[in-house]
Image (cartoon, rainbow, N blue to C red):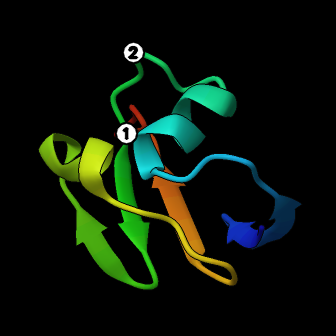
């Protein structure tokens, strides 16, 4: 299916948000996620399905002052 991850079009085989994070190398990383502008908590990622055309945002915390 075709999705958009952080503004870039991608072809994805993952059917859940958790599987997508694994495919993209975010396993174990602390990140915030949203699909189509709606926040998805870490506890819901396994059950959160992905659909063709979804917009996924993955944000990692940054340090600085």
* Residue 42 marker: none
Q: Quadrant of the N terminus?
A: bottom right
Q: Is residue 13 above or below residue 37?
A: above
- What number of labels is visible? 2
Q: Residues within 10 Å of mark 2 (few under 14, many from 20)?
A: few
Q: Residue at x 45, y 50 (%)?
A: 17
Q: Residue at x 63, y 46 (%)?
A: 14
Residue 49 falls in image quadrant: bottom left
Which of the two residues, 61 or 55, is positioned nearer the viewer here?
55
**Residue 28 image position (x, y, % from top left):** 39, 15
In this picture, residue 49 sits left or right of residue 45: right
Q: Secondary structure at mark 1?
A: loop
**Residue 38 image position (x, y, % from top left):** 30, 80
In this picture, residue 2 sits left or right of residue 20: right
Q: On the image, numbered disc 1 is attached to which residue?
A: 31
Q: Residue farthest to the left?
A: 43
How far apart in space, not on screen, are marks 1 and 2 (Cα)?
Answer: 9 Å
**Residue 51 image position (x, y, % from top left):** 57, 75
Q: Residue at x 68, y 33 (%)?
A: 24
Q: Quadrant of the C terminus?
A: top left
Which of the two residues, 36 or 59, is positioned nearer the viewer here?
36
Q: Is residue 10 above or below residue 63?
A: below
Q: On the image, numbered disc 2 is attached to which residue?
A: 28
In this picture, residue 10 sits left or right of residue 24: right
């Amino acid at each position: 299916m075709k999705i958009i991850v952080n503004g870039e079009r991608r072809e994805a085989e993952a059917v859940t948000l958790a599987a997508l994070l694994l495919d993209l190398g975010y396993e174990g990383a602390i990140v915030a996620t949203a699909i189509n502008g709606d926040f998805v908590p870490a506890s819901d990622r396994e059950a959160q399905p992905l659909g063709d055309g979804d917009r996924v945002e993955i944000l990692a915390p940054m340090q600085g002052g």
